[in-house]
Image (cartoon, helix red, strand yellow):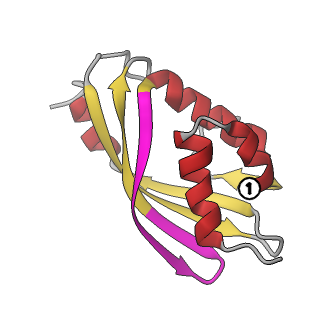
Amino acid sequence: MSRDPVTETRRFWEEAFNGRDVSVLDDLIADDYRNHAALPGTPPGAAGQAAVFERIWAALAGARFAIEHVAVDGDTVICTGTMSGTHAGELLGVPASGRRVEWRMCHLLRFGADGRAVEHSAIRDDAGLLRQMGAMP
């Protein structure tokens, strides 16, 4: 049975991230998956993506990602949305501020022939987030 990349992208955000179920990543992500937006040293595959999610959850209490738009270009799904939460731990080098934040993002997930994600890239409004956390004017 063929997998729909839009459905898999929604599972990535809704089940794995918002549902806090990193076990879903084993089904969604290929072993050689690379996250180009992750911190240096983050391992490939589902374990690396789980580590990224866990770092975000530790930094943003109640973190949620609201999908706003999804589009497909060949083997790549483009997903825009807003991540929100309370800045409760270090994020982008900024100590917890206790402020509620909204972080605009665009994610690109490329899928392999087996329907699992093989690559991730992101464009994020980090400057806007840093302003909300009080780290810059």
Above or below, 65 against 91 in this view is below
* Vertical arrangement, residue 67 with respect to residue 129, above or below: below
Residue span colored magenta: 62-79
Q: Main secondary structure of the magenta part?
A: strand
Q: Is residue 112 left or right of residue 77?
A: right
Q: Residue at x 51, y 22 (%)?
A: 58
- Residue at 61% from the left image edge and 52% from the top image edge: 12
Q: Which residue is mark 1?
A: 28
Q: Is residue 129 visible?
A: yes
Instruction: Report whether 48 appears left or right of 57.
Output: right
Q: In the rendering, at what x and y percent does residue 71 appear?
A: 47, 76
Who is closer to the viewer here, 76 or 128? Answer: 76
Q: Residues within 10 Å of mark 1 (few under 14, many from 20)?
A: many
Percent from the top left, x then y, of residue 121? Answer: 56, 58
Q: Residue lying at the far bottom in this picture: please name it.
A: 74
Residue 29 visible in the picture = no
- Quadrant including the N terminus: bottom right
